[in-house]
Structures are given as structure tokens and as C-alpha cells.
Image (cartoon, grey):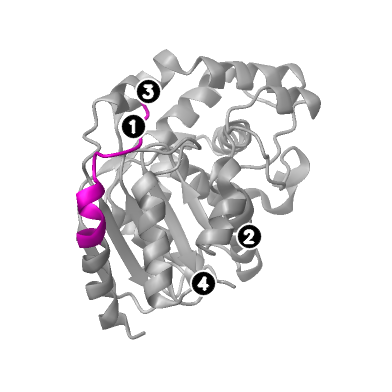
Amino acid sequence: MKDADFQPVLDDIVTTLRPLLGTAGTVASYIPALACIDARQLGIALRTCNGAEAFAGDAETPFSIQSVSKLFTLTLAMQRMGDALWERIGREPSGNPFNSLVQLENEQGKPRNPFINAGAIAVADRLVSQALQAGGSAKADILALMGSLCGEPIAFDDEVARSEAATGFRNIALANFMKSFGKIDNDVAVVLDTYFHQCALRMSCRQLARAAAFLCRDGAHPIDGQAEVTGERQTRRINALMLTCGTYDAAGDVAFSIGLPCKSGVGGGIVAVVPDRLTLCVWSPALDATGNSLLGMKALELFVARTGLSVF
């Protein structure tokens, strides 16, 4: 397909799915600041390797990106630590809920992968260490990365961050559990503050499709094509982890039905990558039983069916 052919596809997907808005799924009510989000919203946007963009529906509406942020904090940690990052974090699918304590105990505090909550908290710990050594702030580093990738300022939603901190008892338990195994170096409160804020990044589908575009360009910067966000080898590894671990314990079904590397979040967003072609972001707040956007997944299925684009 030519770049210009994608806009009618996105328009048609939104038109097809709009009648289903609000009919199934539930928003992430366990985070109070997300419980009041109107589930009757659907956005979709893409950015091609050539820099062409297309978007439809509520693609310009900012939302809490939640676990989609794990993709970008992993990128930042890989930039700074390389393979040393994997000394305390695994690369295998979990097969369990994203906030499981049982699995973490069985594996002596080593998270199964960087996309479950324990793994992302461990990544945040590494970013805090790196920032402290440089006399800076991990939260500022995350904002700088996101602003650079988007070409426009990105901010935290402080209300969501406070809401996460006030009710994130299981995340607090995960962090302290890893600390007890010697797998967290920094003060748990500082690490969790970084983690809660990264989940509270507020972005639109258009911004996320642009920010993730380095993943379809062998690591080349989405806007400044001469700069490198990640090396080609690192980019392949991030895409591989997205395919195998990026959608909680539904990764196998997503690979089967969609066939693209994806990273989802309980805010209802999903980023997907077609290597060497484009990045795609869909958003609809109502979630299925695994914590993935119900209509977002349907939108990705329709996109693959109508374009024939897949890694398989």
C-alpha cells in the first residue's frame, strides 16, 4: 500500500467500530483517576517510515499511557546500560497477570520481563541510579526522551500519578519484595515515584505513533532521521519483547490474531509496529479481562486484515 492509502483504512475502521463503543469492557476502575474516563472513545493514528501520518476518530485526545510507557523507559535503559540491564531482568513471557507476586517469589525477585509491573519497576530503579550518578532526575530524563521523540512537549498527569501512588498497594509490595532480594538499589519510594509518573504520561494516539516510530526505522529518530535512538540490534530486541511480552498474558493470542509487536496499557492505548513500514497507535479506554483495550485489539485486527501487513 502507498502511504496515502492508509487514511481511508483508518477512517473505515473507526466507522466500523464506533457503534460498539460503550457496549462491552470496563475502564481501569482500580485507579481512581481513570475510573471516570468516558469509555465511548476510539482513536487510531499511524506514522510511516517516510514520516507520513494518518489519524482518525479521537486520535488527538490525550490519555494516560500507563504501561505503554514501559516501552520507552526500557529504551532509555537500554541506551544507557546495554546488555548489563539483563543481569536482573528476564526476557521470557510471564503467562501470569502483570502484577503477580507469586511468580516474583518463585524466581527470587528477578522479574520475568521488563513489561510486567515488577520488570518496569526494576527498569525505573536503573534509571534512578543512572540519573543520580549524572546529578539529574529520572523523571526529567523520561520527559526529555518523550519530547524529543514527539517533537513537542510532553507532560505528566499529576492527578493520575497521585492516584496511582495512593492506591498502588500491589506495586508497592512488588518493589519492596524485590528490595528484600537485593534486586532494587535505590530507595523504594523514589523508584516508585518515577514508576508512577512514567505511567501518568499524558499523550495522544498521534503523539505515541510518532514517538514509537524509531522502532520501524531500525532505531533511527522519528524526526531527526540522522540521529539514532537505539541501534539496529537493540531495536530488533525491543520489537521481539513487544511481540512475546507486550500485551500481558494475552501475548500469544495477540501474536495469533494480529501478528504485530504490540505494547498495551490499562489506559486503553496500544502501540503496534510494522518493521520497515510504520508504527500504529490505537486507543479506547474499555478493557478486556486481560487488561488490554477491547476495541483497540479489534481495530488492530481490522487494520491487519485490510492491509495485509504482519511480521508473519
Badge 3: residue crowd in 10 Å (few <14, some 14–19, many ≥20): many
Residue at point 52%, 63% (across, down): 260
Identify the residue under disc 4: 310
Three-letter amino acid code at the position of disc 4 = Ser
Identify the residue under disc 1: 27
Three-letter amino acid code at the position of disc 3 = Ile
Residue at point 69%, 18% (across, down): 177
* Among the 4 quarters of the image, the one containing residue 85: top right
Callout 4 secondary element? loop
Q: Where is residue 104 in the image (x, y as percent from the top left)?
A: 72, 27
Q: Does the magenta stretch include residue 19?
A: yes
Q: Position of residue 110 (x, y in %)?
A: 74, 32
Judged left or right of residue 147, residue 142 is right
Residue at point 32%, 38% (across, down): 24
Residue at point 21%, 41% (across, down): 40
- The answer to whether the residue labelled 1 contacts the one labelled 2, judged by CB atoms less than 8 Å apart, is no
- Please give the range of residues in magenta: 14-31
Q: Is residue 189 above or below residue 66?
A: above
